[in-house]
Every structure is written in structure tokens, then in C-alpha cells.
Image: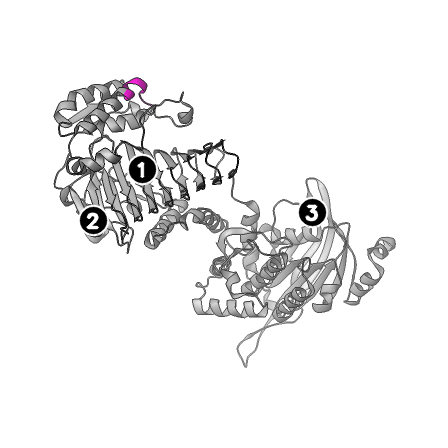
Amino acid sequence: METILTEYSFKDKLVELFYENKKSNFKADIPYLSKLRQEAMHEFERIGFPSNKHEKWRSTNLSKPLTLEYVQHFEPFEKNVDVGKMFSCEVHQLESYLFTQLNGWFVHENGGLNHLPGGVIVGSLASAFVKYPDIIEKHYGKYASFKNNGLIALNTAFAQDGLFVYVPDNVVVDKPVQIINLINLTENLFIQPRNLVILGKNSKLQLLYCDHSLLHKHSLINSVTEVYIDENAVFENYKLQNKDNDSTLITNAWITQKSNSSMVTNMLTLNPGIVRNNIAVTLDGQNCSADLYGLYLVDKEQHVDNHIVVDHAQPNNYSNQLFKGILDDQATGVFNGHILVRKDAQKTNAFQKNQNILLTDKATIDSNPQLEIYADDVKCSHGSTVGQLDAEAMFYMRSRGIAEDVARMALMNAFAAAIIDKINIEPLRTRINELVSKRLRGELSICDQCILDCREGRKYSFDIDMNRLKT
Amino acid sequence: MTGKPARLVQRSKNKGIQIILKYARMLSIKDLKVSINGKEILKGINLEVRTGEVHAIMGPNGTGKSTLASVIAGRDVFDVTGGGVLFEGKDLLELPVEQRACEGIFLGFQYPVEIPGVSIINFMRTAINEQRKYKGLDPIPAPEFLARMDAAKKMLEMQTSLTNRSVNEGFSGGEKKKNEIFQMAMLEPRLAILDETDSGLDIDALRIVANGVNKLRNQNNAFVVITHYQRLLDYIVPDFVHVLFDGKIVKSGGKELALELEEKGYDWIRKNL
């Protein structure tokens, strides 16, 4: 089943599409799910897509990607494809539990659910809907509220597949779980992945999520990820967004933490078209720590927007946001960091920093700290810097014989290193370092970011846009 | 065009090595006039520095000492309105900053810059290799680099771990100045200009830094030491002392001039103008 979404009133078309397909495509839903879908659709019908009139969308304009034509699939377009044969992961020596999604669906042998040591379940959310209705009813849709949020409502109405991870109490997952979400279709594609990650008490998980595109067609992704971190659990989440200029990626991550848990999320945006990352963390317990890092390197007409909300709902918690970006050409960026300290959340420590380097006069960044504090015994700080490369440091380096371009590179690498150094998975850190260096040199050509492994004799035909190859 | 005029070089027939004649002309500043924002800072400086020499430039604050150092190193906030600077026969003012360094000029900064995220070890390896590339040489072999670094650290009594830290980040004033001399030892420049390297140093650090300079002195390099005080010159004994006053060198002499200045103060210069 495939449906063409046309430009006029994307919203109306989607609403129509929902009701047309409700019976045929969502028929396996448990009552909880179908009720949730219907409520979410009502909310979407009510508020639709966010426009620039919304305060939180003032600087990110979706009107352009929303006027394109897309196809949306209600079942996997290709079944039984060995995605592993289409590419090899460029993060060398990374020992991980690797799973792949193609165009938003789990396919081939990863299609169902995989059981890792200790009772850990990783796999397709579609399968989990059927197999684990009790877990779904307990957690699904509980953290990402669609009220007044059209994108989450839309995702909730249509969500069919995505990543499902369940780590039982007291289990430490011994290797990182890695998911590659691959977009490979000869038509413009609209997908809405839905992910649910549950960490039991005293458990530990490292999750690496990579968004990749193979073909340079327009794609629109509206993903929602819900994460529940139970008491004393440790969660590390790395997201690599290495896309292309024709992609629009909207991610919504809603993370709930219980007492004594700790969480690190690191958002690495290297090559977006338009990217909007919403991260909402609720510290719903005490003695939690939440570190949110992000690095964005954008150029040309690219746009990156990170919207962070950390909700200190209870006392004695720590949160820290550090987002850094380098913007070149006419690229535009937004950072909105909201710290909410509720009335009873005494002894809160909440910090936030956003640092930017603009390499041209035309690149812009809109950096907004937003502190909303209702408790009186708190320690909060925020800082935002926008500037060029440090001229004194440039002179100092050059005065030692280092050529200007080499000095620039070194300073930009050093700027990015503050985020890269926070990556705890060593092979990933090494690879990200390489990618960032290449990105900064403008050398991140199609062959470097492409995950088709042509160099080892495999041949796949795909279009190379020569304009993107820098000499 | 090579840096060294051929007439200054003799080839020893027996040993086949180059011997550069003592007192070869290295730096030649002629009637140099420099302004910043329309205000004339240097009003006609003349200075000749030959290989093997140590020159001290003294003078009160705000007379143009640091400006002179910065113009030679290539800081571009200044306008050169007259005169020129030749370094081993080349028009120095035509060269970009990094090429001046590759030609053998080193500036020891009065206020060394902090570079977060760039380790000293990487900074030095990059700088050495960039200078080697300029000279058409391959990158420095790792053992040679490490040996040079160990020797320099030992000479300056630096902590082993210091070179893994980011350049000057969180360093004390004394550590920053030591780091300048460390870099000088690593880069082996032909002409080092030390801009108030003694300021902010306690007496022990001063001794260590001065000993470093003395060990690096040889017949093929030269030093220009800028300082307020005679104190440094007790350790680094200059061949020439110049007094810079109101943008001009108003008095030059041997090392005894520094002692005389210490005794009589800069007012003595002012009165004799």
C-alpha cells in the first residue's frame, strides 16, 4: 500500500489518509493503541502542523518541506532485504548489537524481536505491539504527550514500526546497541518512526542511533522516541545525524528518569538539510543526573534547531546542557534551552551552555536560554556565546609557523572536541573525530559518508551529485 | 633565493660542513616607522642584529618595545608607514606571519594565548612539521620529536604532564612564560625575540628561563630580549643594550649600559635627550 501525499494541504491529506487506512492497516491494534491513535488524530486535526506563528517554531520553517510530494508506506515497501549487504558500518572496531531499519521499518532477519543475554529484547516495535501488549500499555504513549503538539500527535496516530528496547531490572547490556535507520527509495519519502526504550532498575544501556540516507531524494522524517529510565539505571544515547541537503528530520525524544538514574545524550548533527531535535527530559525522582550534549556542523543552506527542555520536577537533581556549533556559508541555527525548576525542586543544580562559531557574515544562530525557576534553593547558570575564531589564538599559532588554514582547522577541531570527548564508546569517538575533521575541511564527500561499501568490490548503482564533491 | 648570502658561507674542505661566519648580518631594521590607528608608535628605528649576538631592548612602558616585537613577528594591526626590515636578505614585512616563523623568527609572547582543546604536544608537532614542510623536509620522526621534547622539558624543569595539557589553559603566569621558552627550544629559531619574558616570573623561574636561553645560544642564532629590568640581564648577558624611548632608540651601548640605567633610572635618559 502506497499513497502519494500531494502539496495542497498536507494536513487534510493526512487526516483523510488516516481514516481511509484505519480499518485495513491498524486492524491488529490492541484497544489501548487504537484508542490512543484516534485521540492523537483528533488532536492533530485540531492543531495541525506547527507554523512560524508558534513561539517554539519561530525560527524553523517547515512550510517548504511540507509543500513537497511524498509517499508514505503502511507496510514495508521491501520485505526480506538484507540491509546488511547494502552497506557496512564505517565505525570500525565497534562491537555492537547492530540492527537496521530500512525506510523506517525493520526488515529481513531483524524483522521481529531479538533476545539478547539477560532477557534484553531489541527489535521491531510493530512486533512488540503484538507480543508484549502489557509493556506497551504500561509505557507506550505515557511520556511523549501529544497534547498541543501536532507532530507527536501525528506520529502517534500513524506509528507502526520503530525500535523497541526492553532491558529488565539488574541487567547491564554488555555491548552498545546500534540502530541504523537507512533511507533508500527512489521517491520522496515520509516516515514516522516510533521508538520505545525501557530501562529497568539498576540496568545499563548504551544506544547508538544513526540516521543515514543513501539516495538523494527528499525525505521527511517525524520520529518520536520515548525513554523510561527506572531507578538507579544508566542510559547513554548517541545520535548521529549525517544526512543530506534534501532531508528534513524532526526528532522528538521524551525521556523520563527515576531516582538515582543517570542519562547522557549526545546529538551529533553533521550534515543535515533541515533538522529539528526536540529533547524533553523529566527528572521524576531524586539524585538523578542528566547530561545533554550536542554538536552541529552546518553549511550551505542547512538549518539545525535544538530545542531542549529539562524539567526538574523533584529536588536534588543535576542537569547540564552543552551544545556547540560551527556554522558556515548561509547556514542557520537555533538553540533553545529551557530549564524548568518546579516549586518543590530544591537543591537543583542545572547548567546550560551554548557556544557557536560563525564562519561567515551570512550564517546566523538564534540562541535562547530560558530559565523558569519556582524553587528558591537552586544553582542554575546559562551562557551563550556567538563569535568568530579567536584572532589572538590564530596569530599565536601562525607565529609558530602553522599555516592559516591548518590553524583554523586546529581551532575548529578543538572547539568540537569538547563534545566529542564526551563520547564514551572509543571506536565511535575515533570515527566521529575523523568525520568531524573531514566535515570541517569540507571533505566529507559522498564517498566518505556513504555507507555503500563500493571500495570492496561491491557495486551498487546510485546517483552521485557531482556538485557535492569538493575538489 | 636562499636565506643566507653566499659570501658569508665558507665550506670547510676537510670536514665538508658549513661554517657560518661569525657576525653575519641577520636582522636589519632601517628607519622603521609604525602607526596604529593613525598614531605613530615607532618613529624611525634602526637596528642591526648579527648571528651569535644578544641584544637587549630596554625602556619605560609605552615606548614601543612590544610594538617592535609584534611588527617583526607579523601582527597585522599596525601600519608600517616608513622604512623596512630585512631578515637574512629577505623583506620580512612582505611575508605572512607563518612564513616569518618558518624563516626562523620566534616571538616569545608577553601575554601567551590560551588555546583550549589543543594540546601542547600536538601544537608543537604541528608547528615543527609545518616548518619542516616549508623547508621541503619530511615530518619529524616520532623518536626525534620525543627526544627533543624530553630534553626541553628537562632543561626548563617542566612537569612531564604539562605537555599533554591544552596550550596555556589554566597555566600560572610563570608556567606560561616557561612554555614560551619550551616552544623556542622545540622550534630552534634563528632569531628569538623575547617580549618581557621576565615579567611575572619569580626568581627561581627567572633563573630557569634564563638558563634555558643561555643553553640555546650559539653562533648561528641571535636573541632580542625586551625587558624593563636589569635583573634578567644578570642571567642573560647581552652583547648590546638599546634604550627605546618615545619610538626611537636613543642610546645604545654594551652590557654596562643596563647597569647604568638601573642605577640612574630612565629620568637620566629623559634629561639627556
Please check whether the numbered discs 2 and 1 fall on a single chain.
Answer: yes
The magenta segment: A43-49
The residue mark sitting in front, 3 or 1, is 1
What residue is rendered at 23% in x and 51% in y? A455
Location of residue B210 in the rendering, given as x and y in whole percent from the top left corner: 66, 67
Circle 1: residue type? Asp
| Other-residue count near label 1 (Cα within 10 Å), few / some / many at <14 / 14–19 / ≥20 | many
Q: Is residue B25 visible?
A: no
| Disc 2 to disc 1: CB gap under 8 Å | no
Outermost front residue: A344
Q: Residues within 10 Å of mark 2 (few under 14, many from 20)?
A: some
Q: CA distance from mark 2 to mark 1?
A: 37 Å
Amino acid carrying mark 3 in the image: Val
Residue neighbourhood size for the residue with mark 3, other residues' Cα within 10 Å, grouped as few (<14), some (14–19), many (≥20): many
Give the residue at mark 2. A119
State which quadrant residue A212 falls in: top left
Q: Which residue is mark 3?
A: B34
Instruction: Identify the element where label 1 is drawn.
Output: loop
The majority secondary structure of the magenta stretch comes to helix
Asked whether B147 or A72 is in front, the reply is: A72
Looking at the image, which residue is at 26% across and 35% down?
Answer: A139
Residue A244's disc number:
1
